[in-house]
Amino acid sequence: MRRLWLLFAQTATIGLALWFIVTTLKPDWIGQLSRSNQSLQLSSSMNIREAPVTAMPAQTTYSIGAKRAMPSVVNINTAKESRKSDNALLNDPFIKRFFGDQPNPQNERQTSLGSGVIVSSQGFILTNYHVIEGADEIDVSLPDGRKAMAKVVGSDPETDLAVIKINLPDLPAITFGHSEVTSVGDVVLAIGNPFGVGQTVTMGIISALGRNDVGLNTYENFIQTDAAVNFGNSGGALVDIQGNLLGINSAIYSRNGGSLGIGFAIPVTTIKMVMEGIIADGQVVRGWIGVEPQDITPEMADSFNIKQTSGAIVAGVIRGGPADKAGIKPGDILIAIEGKPAANKTEVLNLIAQLKPDTKVKLTLLRNASESTVSVLIGKRPSIKREE
C-alpha cells in the first residue's frame, strides 16, 4: 500500500512539474489544446448554426437559359474521302474506261467537326453549310448520349446554312427567339462543341447588329458577339438568357484560329426564311435580275462626277437577263425597288432576292442625273456553289 502511494505521489509531482514548464515556456500549446477540445465538442453535439439557402446573397446566373437550350444543341462529325492522286495513270480516262476506278493509296479519309441545333421534333437540324459541305457521312451526337446518322435535306451556300435530318424519337427542339428586337449590349450565350472537347457554354454580349460587309456570304446580316466562339462552334446556337435561339454561330475573326472576341452569327430572321425554303423545296428560291451592283464610294463619285451618295451603281449587266431585257445599263444607279429605298449594294441584293420570280416589279434608277422607272420581269436566281 505504501509503495502504491509513493508511486502516485511521484507521478503527480512529475505531472505538475511538466504542467509548470509548459505553461511557462509554451503557453500557446494550452490554447491550441483548448480550441481542439471545443471543436470536438461541436462536432460531437452538431450544435452549429447554418444560414438558410434563401439567405444566400443574390448572384447573377444564366443557368436557366443554358439548361433550356443545351439539350437542343448537337455535335456533328463528318467524314469524306480525299481523292487526290499524283498517279496520272490511274486518272487517265482510257484506263478508267476499261479497268474502272482503281484503288488509290493516296486517298485519305478526312474528318471534321461542328455543331447543330434541333429546330423540330421531327428531326430537322440546322447547321452551317460549311460544316457538312462535301461530306460522305454525317454523324450526329445528342447531349443525352444518343447518336444517329443524318441525311442532308438541303443547303443554301449563299447564307452558309444547311438543314439535315435524323430519325430519333422525343427530340428536344429549341425555342426560337426574336433577333429583330435585340439590342447592342444584350447578354447572349454561345453553345457548341469547340475543338471537340464536348458541349460548352460561353457568355458575352451583342457587340453589333446588321454586319453586312464581312465578305463571307452573298447575303449577310450578322449578329456580332464577343462570346467565345472557336473551331467546332460553327452551326451552334446563340441564345438569349432565357435560352431562346437568336442566331446560328457561323464564323469568327481570328489570326490564329482562336477566339479574339469577334464572332458572327446568322440571325433568326434569316434562318426562318432559309429553313422554310429548304424544307419545302430543298433550296431557297430568290429573285434575280442579272446585274452586278457596287457601292458608290467617294472615289467613284469624284471620278464619274456622281452627286448621288445612296443606292448602288450597276457595274455589269448579264446579257439576255431580266435587267438587260428591261433596258438597264452599266452606270445606272439603282435607288429603289418597288418603292423601297435601297441605300447600298447589300440592300439592293436583299430587296431583289425577296421578290418572287415571274413577277413584274418597278425599279427606280438614276441615269445621267435623271430619275426614271423601269419595269422588270423578275427571274429565278441561279444556284451558286461555293468554291472549295
Image: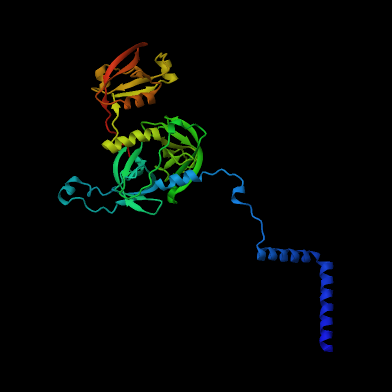
Percent across and percent down for residue 153 are 29, 42
Percent across and percent down for residue 48 are 66, 59
Q: Identify the residue at horizontal 46%, vertical 35% (top origin).
A: 224
Q: Identify the residue at horizontal 20%, vertical 46% (top origin).
A: 92
Q: Is residue 25 above or below residue 170?
A: below
Asked whether residue 278 is in view, the answer is yes
Q: Identify the residue at horizontal 64%, vertical 55% (top origin).
A: 50
- The answer to which quarter of the image holds residue 265 is top left
Foreground pick, 59 / 383: 59
Q: Identify the residue at horizontal 21%, vertical 50% (top origin).
A: 101
Number of numbered labels in the structure image: 0
Foreground pick, 59 / 141: 59
Quadrant assignment for the N terminus? bottom right
Q: How is the image coloured?
A: rainbow
Q: Is residue 46 above or below residue 345?
A: below
Quadrant assignment for the C terminus? top left
